Amino acid sequence: MTVHSEENNEQSIPKKCDNTDTDYSDLYPGRRQAPVRNWFDKIFFMEKYDEIQRTKCEFNVYNCIQNSPLVKLMMAALKSSGCEIDLSRHISCEVCDKSVTGGYDPQLNQIIICQNAAQSRVQSSLVHEMVHMFDYCRNHLDLTNLDHLACTEIRAANMCHCSFLGACSQGIASPIHIKEVHKECVANKAIKSILAVQNVSEEEAKESVSRVFNRCYNDLEPIGRRIRRNSEDMKKAYLEAPLYGYID
């Protein structure tokens, strides 16, 4: 599961390995093996630069956990579901492919924040991946099942990313068709995320999203609402969390 960088939405999805499991070798090159440094990296101190990026990323993650109502809500929901997050164990800042800003690795039960791409979008990336972690913990998410993957991507995009203001910036918004535009945004983001991690055709991804869309689009657990930009929705969702048993 991935969060796509807005600057790279029009780029093609990186080629993936031919398998049925969620693959991380291209999007998250450091997941399965240590990075190999070439002479260029050594001459220009790229390793030191990566360390500086990682430190900034970890600071931003910590700041979000301390101050973001939405991140604190997700932390509480995971804890109440028996999946409490250990910051040093379950969240990792790493260098990723530039087409994504985050990911969730179910094999290690770990959220990936892309230190070279997330930057100012750490909060949205964290919440997006925490939705995946919540689904994996509480809803027994099976990532080899395309419909399961489609559902969790729909839920994450629905509650974390798509908004009327975002549609305005893309030139596709209409005051008359706000709801339809939002649904289209969610579906498109889910399809792109599926294509990033599964070796399936675009048609297969679209069919899977279509099969589960209505049920998963209306499932707002544990946030309880769609978050609008520049609104009090995040604070309201956090204040309502104890009513549903989510206490941090």
Image: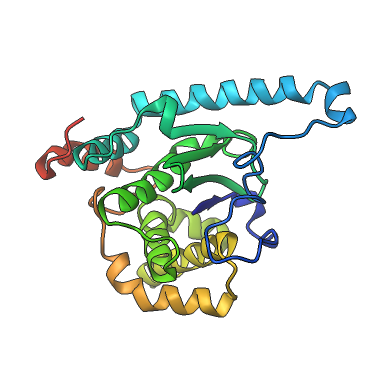
Give the quadrant of residue 163. Answer: bottom left
- Residue at left offset 34%, top offset 36%: 71
131 horizontally vs 108: left or right: left
222 horizontally vs 166: left or right: left
The colour scheme is rainbow
Give the quadrant of residue 88. Answer: top left
- Residue at left offset 47%, top offset 43%: 125
- Residue 90 at x, y percent in the picture: 42, 34
- Residue 166 at x, y percent in the picture: 49, 55
If the image is split into quadrants, where does the C terminus sit?
top left
Observer able to see residue 217:
yes
Of residues 133 and 17, which is closer to you in this image? 17
- Residue at left offset 24%, top offset 49%: 222
- Residue at left offset 44%, top offset 75%: 208
Q: In this figure, what is the number of numbered marks?
A: 0
Of residues 164 and 12, which is closer to you in this image? 12
- Residue 247 at x, y percent in the picture: 16, 33
Observer able to see residue 175:
no
Of residues 107 and 62, which is closer to you in this image? 107
Give the quadrant of residue 120. Answer: top right
Give the residue furthest to the left. Answer: 243
27 horizontally vs 181: left or right: right
Taking 182 as reference, is 126 above or below it?
Answer: above
- Residue 238 at x, y percent in the picture: 23, 37
